[in-house]
Image (tube, grey):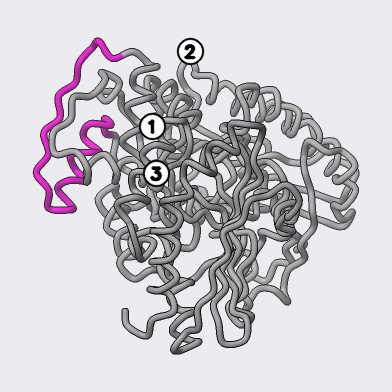
């Protein structure tokens, strides 16, 4: 069957794609920016990639007419404050576009929306379901609560809280009940639902066997990790204060933290488990989902991470818009140094950031990251998804990977930190030297003052970093 996969660069889409290909489907992957779509080489000859922006109706003409099934895995929760209208309009445009194709079945992954009063986020999910239901195809909606898996936003937030805070004074919404589900089960439900007639024109709640409060989830996480944690809930923490608490302690953005806090006050518990018997699926427990996630992390097998989504920073343009580093009106810091071993030098460049740090002056990088968090930026807490590989579109601390070619020996990063201007950092092998270039395009007088204020630190950090990168020693 020919399947349209929206959200192919997202957390769920990246994990669903190889399973669909393995099942023999011909998959058409939708991406707003083809440059940041990096499927494994084993899949590249078996899929088609098209550029589609659901808010740009002209791009919807790229959708093939002969698709037979489709997955709707798109959301705009952190794209802007008006994300609800953006999500509704995206659903309308998608519905109109695929209704003139041969599509028979659309599967939509939503949130559990069983309460009378819903948060803005969950109300938006419901509105999308209503719009998708107006198409001339069969629609199946799978409604999930907290998804637990390596790299998922929920898992990473829980991990940050538990591993960083031995003692927590928390908002009262930690006593709200939810029904977490492992990412492996979510993928199973998605794949087995497609073209399953018993699911046509219906919606189903999907969840694991455990119904837990958020507090119980944190404590169970601590138990699995062998950590002793104490949690006290208080009734005086406002939603805004709770959002700031999540933002500063975890790697989430403030906008995402706000949406999550508002949703966490609402119970997300399955109405029933009819879908389990229809598809013959027995979901794993929360404990098993945690252990599975940590197994992937320990083996460096994280397939996808929410941090690599543009939502983690607010970047809205195509990556190709930043690949040509400007020169006019820019300040540059260019340094060159011969390397002792080319392969060792490239290996170090490709290992930069995250747990490995920036090789020199890491305490200054951490201070800069903290300052960025205070200013509303991502800071350093996003880290990196994989210890050894870097792909275009990946988040790398407070940078975004714009270009990465290991054979060529070139890595180009674009700054997503809060700045009075724009910044690029490039590492490039030229003959037998490593050329390291920091470029800053200032915005007004403030930008120029910023450059000169950090210039003394550049001399210390960039010189030391270049020396470490070109050295044969670790």
Residue under label 1, please give it: 247
Q: Hey, which quadrant is residue 220 in on the image?
A: top left
- Residue at 73%, 68% in the rendered image: 47
**201 or 100: nearer the eye?**
100
Q: Hey, which quadrant is residue 257 in on the image?
A: top left
Left or right, residue 290 beside residue 403? left
Residue under label 2, please give it: 117
Q: Which residues are magenta?
A: 212-237
Helix, strand or loop at label 2? It is loop
Residue 470: percent from the left, percent from the top?
Answer: 44, 79
Residue 1: percent from the left, percent from the top?
Answer: 75, 63
Residue under label 3, please give it: 369
**39 or 400: nearer the eye?**
400
Where 60 falls versus 332 (above or below)? above
Mark closer to the chain start, 2 or 1: 2
Helix, strand or loop at label 3? It is helix
Mark closer to the chain start, 3 or 2: 2
Q: Quadrant of the C terminus?
A: bottom left
């Amino acid at each position: 069957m020919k399947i349209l996969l929206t959200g192919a660069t997202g957390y769920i889409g990246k994990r669903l794609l190889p399973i669909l290909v393995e099942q023999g489907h011909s998959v058409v992957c939708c991406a707003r920016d083809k440059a940041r779509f990096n499927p494994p080489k084993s899949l590249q000859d078996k899929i088609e990639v098209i550029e589609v922006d659901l808010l740009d109706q002209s791009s919807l003409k790229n959708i093939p007419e002969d698709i037979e099934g489709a997955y709707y895995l798109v959301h705009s929760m952190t794209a802007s404050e008006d994300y609800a209208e953006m999500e509704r309009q995206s659903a309308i445009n998608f519905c109109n576009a695929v209704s003139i194709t041969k599509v028979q079945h659309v599967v939509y992954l939503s949130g559990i929306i069983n309460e009378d009063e819903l948060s803005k986020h969950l109300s938006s999910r419901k509105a999308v379901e209503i719009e998708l239901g107006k198409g001339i195809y069969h629609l199946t909606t799978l409604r999930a609560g907290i998804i637990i898996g390596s790299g998922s936003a929920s898992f990473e937030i829980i991990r940050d809280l538990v591993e960083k805070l031995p003692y927590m004074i928390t908002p009262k919404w930690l006593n709200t009940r939810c029904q977490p589900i492992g990412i492996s089960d979510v993928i199973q439900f998605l794949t087995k639902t497609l073209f399953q007639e018993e699911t046509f024109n219906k919606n189903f709640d999907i969840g694991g066997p455990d119904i837990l409060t958020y507090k119980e989830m944190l404590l169970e996480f601590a138990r699995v990790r062998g950590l002793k944690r104490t949690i006290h809930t208080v009734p005086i923490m406002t939603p805004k204060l709770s959002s700031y608490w999540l933002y500063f302690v975890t790697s989430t953005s403030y906008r995402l933290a706000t949406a999550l806090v508002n949703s966490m006050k609402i119970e997300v518990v399955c109405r029933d488990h009819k879908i389990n018997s229809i598809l013959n699926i027995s979901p794993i427990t929360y404990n098993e989902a945690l252990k599975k996630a940590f197994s992937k992390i320990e083996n460096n097998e994280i397939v996808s991470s929410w941090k690599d989504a543009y939502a983690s920073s607010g970047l809205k343009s195509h990556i190709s818009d930043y690949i040509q580093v400007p020169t006019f009106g820019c300040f540059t810091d260019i340094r060159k140094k011969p390397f002792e071993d080319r392969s060792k030098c490239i290996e170090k460049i490709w290992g930069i950031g995250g747990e490995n740090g920036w090789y020199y002056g890491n305490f200054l990088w951490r201070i800069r990251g903290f300052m960025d968090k205070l200013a509303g930026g991502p800071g350093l807490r996003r880290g990196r998804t994989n210890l050894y590989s870097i792909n275009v579109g990946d988040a790398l601390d407070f940078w975004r990977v714009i270009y990465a070619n290991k054979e060529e020996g070139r890595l180009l990063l674009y700054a997503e930190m809060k700045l009075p201007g724009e910044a690029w950092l490039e590492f490039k092998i030229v003959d037998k030297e490593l050329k390291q270039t920091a470029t800053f395009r200032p915005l007004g007088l403030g930008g120029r003052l910023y450059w000169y204020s950090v210039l003394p630190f550049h001399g210390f950090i960039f010189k030391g970093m270049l020396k470490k990168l070109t050295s044969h020693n670790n």
